[in-house]
Amino acid sequence: MADRRWTARDIPGLRGRTAVVTGANTGLGFAIAAALAGRGADVVLACRDAIKAAAAADRISTLTPGATVRTLPLDLASLASVRAAAHHLHAAYDRVDLLVNNAGGIRRWYGVSEDGFESTIAVNHIGPFAFTGLVLDLMTDVPGSRVVTVASNGHRQGSIDPADLDPEQGPEYRFTTAYYRAKLANLLFTYELNRRLEASGSRTIALAGNPGIARTDGGREMNRLVRTVLNPKVNPIVLALSQSAAKGALGPLRAATDPDARGGDYYCPPGRAQRTGYPVRGTSSGLSHDIGLQRRLWRETELLTEVSY
């Protein structure tokens, strides 16, 4: 099997395994959850909107009759919601085989979460860090368990100061800068988590999957003009430089299920731009592998969330 042609058909049977996918009611998250359910996994859709989550669960059940699909309320912009979701997961399950940290996105305007964190870093990094830490005990003794975080090639343009995760405010805020920072944080988190898991002798590994430029509703907060320009039905250039959500989901899915995957792997479309194509084992930026930066971000995020692994 050539690397460039890894598809959902290569996902091994997952019957008896439990997968939690955040932000699974639409886009990449839905495609990931549907593919896992299609291979027999019991899937938990951890979503902010309960109505949309229930509709997504019904859609997956229609696609895969007999699939076990449940929903879990989770708002990553609220640490109270994160703690409540972790509590509910512990009450319902004695083990989790796979956690896919997919939920995230771009916030067009400057804003803060209910805990006072800049919104983009809160939803993409701080919330997932806390949720992972609070449910990790359900995974560490489970053979083959994995924590997969959805990445972006935008991390290459990111920079981060762990002591100040909200450097731009008000008119100085740039949503792209905030997003690139958050996606860099995702990889710093993944690599530090995997190193800690290895050192502890855990059976869990941490990996990342980059979907490339996938056609989803991740830009729903952009203004109408930007949404129109980015619409592949209107702009053939966007169509040529992007891929469907189902194909974009293959990077995270390969990280989640490929038997040959190793802790710390980064799966992405081929080529330097990593825009489209079947996922391969790739490389992320040098900055994302800065161990000192990884450790500083980890310490600061523990302090912010009061979640210690």
Image: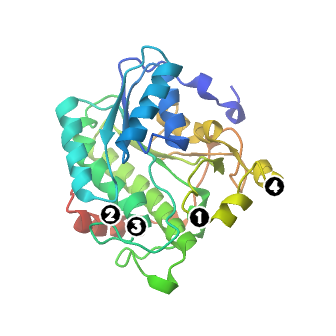
Q: Which amino acid type is shown beneath numbered disc 1?
A: Met
N-term mark: 3 or 1: 3
**Residue 32 in the image: x percent, y percent?**
51, 35
* Residue 309 in view (yes/no): no
Disc 2 and disc 3: Cα gap in Å?
19 Å
Check the image and name the residue furthest to the top: 66
Between marks 4 and 1 in the image, the one whose residue lies nearer the viewer:
1
> Of the numbered discs in the image, which one, if any, rests on residue 222?
1
Q: Which amino acid type is shown beneath numbered disc 4?
A: Ile
**Residue at x 71%, y 56% (from the top left corner):** 273
Instruction: Look at mark 3 in the image and give the residue it sits on.
Output: 119
Q: Which amino acid type is shown beneath numbered disc 2?
A: Trp
Q: Which amino acid type is shown beneath numbered disc 3?
A: Ser
- Which element carries disc 2, helix, strand or loop? helix
Instruction: Look at mark 2 in the image and give the residue it sits on.
Output: 298
Q: Is residue 64 left or right of residue 211?
A: left
Instruction: Look at mark 4 in the image and give the residue it sits on.
Output: 237
The N terminus lies in quadrant: top right
**Residue at x 45%, y 21% (from the top left corner):** 61
N-term mark: 4 or 1: 1
Label count reads 4
Disc 2 and disc 1: Cα gap in Å?
31 Å
